Image (tube, rainbow, N blue to C red):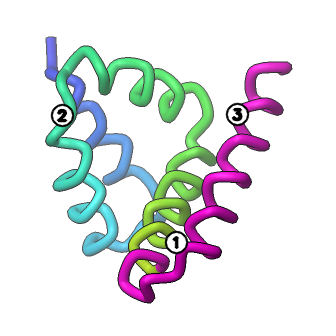
Amino acid sequence: MALNIEKFKILLADSDLPEEEQQELVDVFSRASDADLEPIVELLSEDPKWIQIVADNYKDKKDAIRANDPAAWDQIIKNEEQVLVRFASD
């Protein structure tokens, strides 16, 4: 059975994300434990549109940190909360 990071790599490879973005996400998510990656892999497997959502969210966070923009960071977190509430109610 493949480790979840390997499954994650396969899901990204099958997506429309550019290879550079794929590798960046692999680098970030490879820091997580296999158990922590399991629900992420399940979500991305069930609904591949989440791959782009995760990639965009990561990019937004990276941009906010680089710009040292707390207001942008706060907005990202608020958006995440809204998405999670909608996701939990489905």
Q: What is the span of residues highlighted in magenta in the rendered image?
A: 64-90
> In the picture shown, does residue 72 fall above or below 33?
below
Q: Amino acid at mark 2?
A: Glu
- The numbered dot on residue 84 is 3
Name the element at disc 3. helix
> In the picture shown, does residue 8 fall above or below 87?
below
> In the picture shown, does residue 44 fall above or below 63?
above
Q: Amino acid at mark 3?
A: Leu
Q: Circle 1 sits on which residue?
A: 60
- The numbered dot on residue 6 is 2
Residue shown at the point (70%, 41%) measured from the top left? 81
**Magenta span includes 25:** no
Viewer-closest of 39 and 3: 39
Q: Amino acid at mark 1?
A: Asp
Work out how far the residue at label 1 is from the one at label 3, CA to CA, in angstroms: 17 Å
Work out how far the residue at label 2 is from the one at label 3, CA to CA, in angstroms: 25 Å
Residue shown at the point (15%, 20%) measured from the top left? 2
